[in-house]
Image (spheres, rainbow, N blue to C red):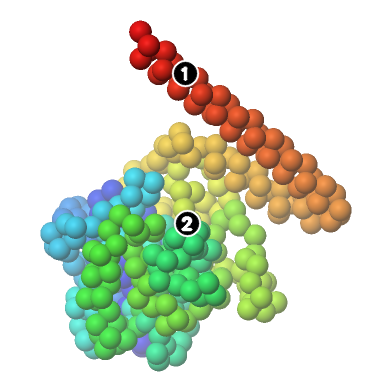
């Protein structure tokens, strides 16, 4: 029976989520031999034991790699990415960590849940490609595009689900190049390791169907490269759910499809699972996103195009007026501060 290699990165704070993800892989791929390569730094013995016991129940093999984070001392994580840690860079070590007999490995973020058999990913022809991944909505600006080294018509990919071609990484020295670029760019990176990976593998990545990166509270991605079958599979039979951004299933605010996370967390045997309080600055954004999702999903299909256009125009007008009055208020405040400054100098 073929052996499939899976890898992920975690720490003690993310063990609950890591176990839910790994359990979803093992539960839905029972017909295959799975070898888990878990990257960590100083993961507690109790956490390692929990994960090992779960792997043993599914007759999967597992190996723990304690990463020396002193090698990442020059790297940082932006404050606006509270769900990321320095562990996100651990995957750069894979070519040297794993035995050279391992040609490819499936990397999965801990905010991922696998719903189906993913063995077909291991049979994709990746000759000439560094990774296989799902297309991402980034870059978010021209500056972000420059950071990734992309041209106007270049595509970017999401780094949450990656089929990594280790042979390519070793042949082209990608490990060294990834670390060099990450160190060079430092705080200029918008999305940390994802920007670095996109820079390294621009035009050298294989695009996976969107069903391998289903994002809750999103409608079918608008992409002319899709076939009707891709749209149907994304909507009705996604293979992997990726709870991207700050909208996580373990928050104390319910979101669509969070039930899968809790299902596999229960199956994993993780003791005393808990919810995480949603940060105040994100609560309104999550609620608004939920409302938009339900409106798009249940209401929009029944609204005539002309009505939708009128509503959009009205919203745009109110948005513009709000912007104008806000700017005027700030300008008046600025003038008042200048006048007070001059007044204080006079006396």
Judge whether 200 appears above or below 345 on screen: below
Q: Residues within 10 Å of mark 1 (few under 14, many from 20)?
A: few
Residue bearing the label numbered 2: 244
Quarter containing the N terminus:
bottom left
Q: Residue furthest front?
A: 346
Q: Secondary structure at mark 2?
A: loop
Q: Which mark is residue 139?
A: none
For marks 2 and 1, give the one nearer the viewer: 1
Question: In the rendering, at what x and y percent does residue 44 appear?
Answer: 17, 53
Residue name at image x 51 percent, y 78 percent = 207
Q: Residues within 10 Å of mark 2 (few under 14, many from 20)?
A: some
Residue 20 shows in this picture: no
| 92 to the left or right of 324 | left
Quarter containing the C terminus:
top left
Residue bearing the label numbered 1: 339
Contact between marks 2 and 1 (CB within 8 A): the answer is no
How many numbered dots are placed on residues in this image? 2
Residue name at image x 85 percent, y 49 percent = 307
Judge whether 62 appears above or below 84 on screen: below
Q: Secondary structure at mark 1?
A: helix
Q: Residue furthest top?
A: 347
Q: Nearer the viewer, residue 203 or 124?
A: 203
């Amino acid at each position: 029976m073929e052996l499939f290699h899976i890898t992920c990165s975690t720490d003690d704070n993310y063990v609950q989520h890591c176990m839910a993800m790994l359990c979803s892989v093992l539960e839905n791929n029972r017909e295959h031999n799975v070898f888990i390569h878990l990257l960590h730094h100083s993961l507690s013995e109790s956490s390692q034991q929990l994960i090992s016991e779960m792997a043993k129940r599914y007759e999967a093999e597992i190996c723990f790699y304690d990463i020396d984070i002193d090698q990442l001392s020059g790297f940082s994580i932006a404050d606006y990415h509270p769900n990321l840690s320095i562990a996100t860079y651990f995957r750069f070590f894979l070519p040297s960590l794993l035995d050279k007999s391992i040609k490819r490995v499936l990397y999965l973020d801990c905010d991922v849940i696998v719903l189906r058999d993913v063995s077909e990913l291991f049979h994709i022809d990746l000759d000439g490609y560094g990774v296989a991944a799902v297309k991402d909505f980034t870059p978010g600006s021209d500056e972000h595009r420059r950071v990734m080294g992309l041209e106007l018509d270049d595509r970017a990919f999401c780094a949450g689900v990656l089929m990594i071609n280790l042979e390519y990484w070793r042949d082209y020295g990608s490990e060294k190049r990834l670390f060099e670029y990450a160190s060079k760019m430092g705080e200029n990176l918008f999305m940390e390791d994802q920007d670095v990976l996109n820079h390294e593998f621009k035009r050298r990545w294989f695009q996976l169907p969107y069903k391998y990166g289903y994002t809750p509270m999103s409608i079918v991605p608008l992409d002319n490269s899709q076939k009707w079958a891709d749209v149907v599979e994304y909507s009705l039979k996604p293979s992997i759910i990726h709870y991207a951004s700050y909208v996580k299933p373990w928050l104390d605010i319910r979101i669509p499809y969070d039930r899968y996370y809790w299902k596999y967390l229960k199956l994993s045997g993780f003791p005393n699972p808990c919810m995480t309080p949603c940060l105040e600055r994100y609560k309104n954004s999550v609620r608004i996103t939920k409302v938009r999702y339900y409106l798009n999903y249940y209401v929009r299909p029944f609204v005539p195009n002309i009505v939708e256009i009128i509503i959009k125009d009205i919203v745009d007008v109110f948005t513009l007026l709000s912007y104008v009055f806000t700017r005027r208020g700030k300008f008046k405040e600025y003038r008042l501060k200048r006048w007070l400054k001059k007044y204080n100098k006079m006396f």
